[in-house]
Amino acid sequence: MKDTLNGIANYRKWLNAQKRAFSDIASDIAENAAKVNDSVHSFISVDKDEILLKAGNVEKSGHSGALYGVPVAVKDNICIKDVLTTCASRILEGFRPPYNATVIEKLEKAGALVIGRANMDEFAFGSSCETSCYGPTRNPWDISRVPGGSSGGAAAAVAAGQVVASLGSDTGGSIRQPGALCGIVALKPTYGRVSRYGLIAFASSLDQIGPMTRNVEDSAKLLEIIAGHDPKDSTSVDIEVPNYSKELGGGIEGLTIGIPGEYFIEGIAKDVLLRVKEAMEVYRKLGARIVDISLPHTKYALSCYYIIAPAEASSNLARYEGVHYGRRAKANDLIDMYIKSRNEGFGPEVKRRVILGTYVLSSGYYDAFYLKAQKVRTKIKEDFDAAFKKCDIILTPTSPTTAFKIGERMDDPLSMYLSDVFTIPANLAGLPAISIPCGLDGSGLPVGLQLMGKPFGEATLFKAAYAHEKNNIN
């Protein structure tokens, strides 16, 4: 079954050759997902009845959409109507959204078999998929290691062959970093390219939904389907969506690739650095021009992010008080209920970030921290604007290391936060960025290569990523 689910084209070819009802095929998909889930735990749970119900709807639709019958996993912070959606947090236990996220509507319109509740770090706060109240997801390449986070379940489901593709969300690297650690293709689109309507917010000025797939062509096809203007999202940009998948094979001769010295620093694993440098040579041989660039404010990006993101998170999570939905603790009065519901419902990492965010927004500290961080964010964006006058795309490692052991960084938040040191700047600047596999380290674990592009420059990213995918020998 795993080989059958290896890519949209491969799966559709196999599906068209079947002489069975789609509901029977969906039953096999559900059974395979449940079997693999016992060891990987990419899904919070696999509800066979729910999958078969959705398969019946797909079968009844009778159309041959671009994703007809394709099983797609969805991170547990993207709303699916009447399906339990909890952000892997006890505070949202029992919550079933009364509506679909826009991206779910688009997937279903394209005929996809939407499979919900891929595991994640609680409220997307994490880089290892260990903070989920349902327990950690494990990396299919080595189940003693993390899959990355926060979209760890969505990445692992694709890598383990449970689904053909997934949707994750990326606030500081939560699509790309697990994509790198699980050896798949993972795209964070330009901020505003994909509607956030129905995405349960972490940091509203940073969050973006994106595809996680086995190959670049599938990523391009999925973005074609989920991208586009949505009047329900005020940050959604009304710009035409290109036919990305038809522009992949044009070659990259003459493309200028920038290499920022600030991203090649002490602390990168030796094998990661080696694989990334080999990728540069692949591009050089394909006719791309490699140039050195500078992004001088990169060194402030991590600090900037961990002021802005928790500040926005503390504001967004204020709505979870035990009144409107989710967990409600037994208490003597209203204030006691607020305190107990949040104390019982939120895990340690969520509490840490909410407290940090509340602090930097508090009277007397707003100007010293939050306002200054926003000014630094502007400087980071200006660095990218200047760099893109010299190059078409920027090449860096996705993660400084390959997958680390489960539990290894849980007691060291700073070490965990450093996992996203190369991915955070793209979110702060609102840029598109993609992680693609570029070989293995000495332990046989995947290494990720990150390509960053100009705003709404996903077509160029796909073309460059596709060229590497077709010519990389690692």
Image: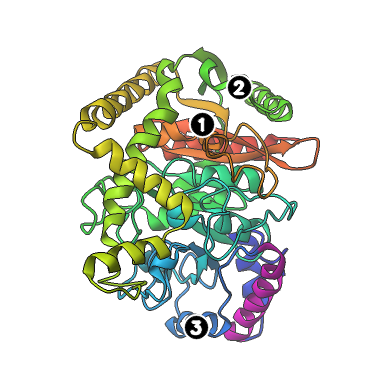
Q: Nearer the viewer, mark 2 or mark 1?
A: 1
The residue identified by callout 2 is: 287
| Residue 139: percent from left, percent from top | 68, 53
| Residue 397: percent from left, percent from top | 59, 30
SS under mark 1: loop
SS under mark 3: helix
Callout 3, which amino acid? Glu
The residue identified by callout 1 is: 421
| C-alpha gap between disc 2 and disc 3 | 47 Å
Residue bounds of the magenta highlight = 21-40
Q: Earlier in the sequence, mark 2 or mark 1?
A: 2
Q: Nearer the viewer, mark 2 or mark 3?
A: 3
SS under mark 2: loop
Residue neighbourhood size for the residue with mark 3, other residues' Cα within 10 Å, grouped as few (<14), some (14–19), many (≥20): some
| Residue 250: percent from left, percent from top | 54, 36
The residue identified by callout 3 is: 59
| C-alpha gap between disc 2 and disc 1 | 30 Å
Residue at 54% of width from left, 84% of height from top?
A: 52
Residue 276 seen = yes
Tell me how the rendering is colored: rainbow
The image quadrant where one finds the C terminus is top right
Residue at 46% of width from left, 64% of height from top?
A: 76
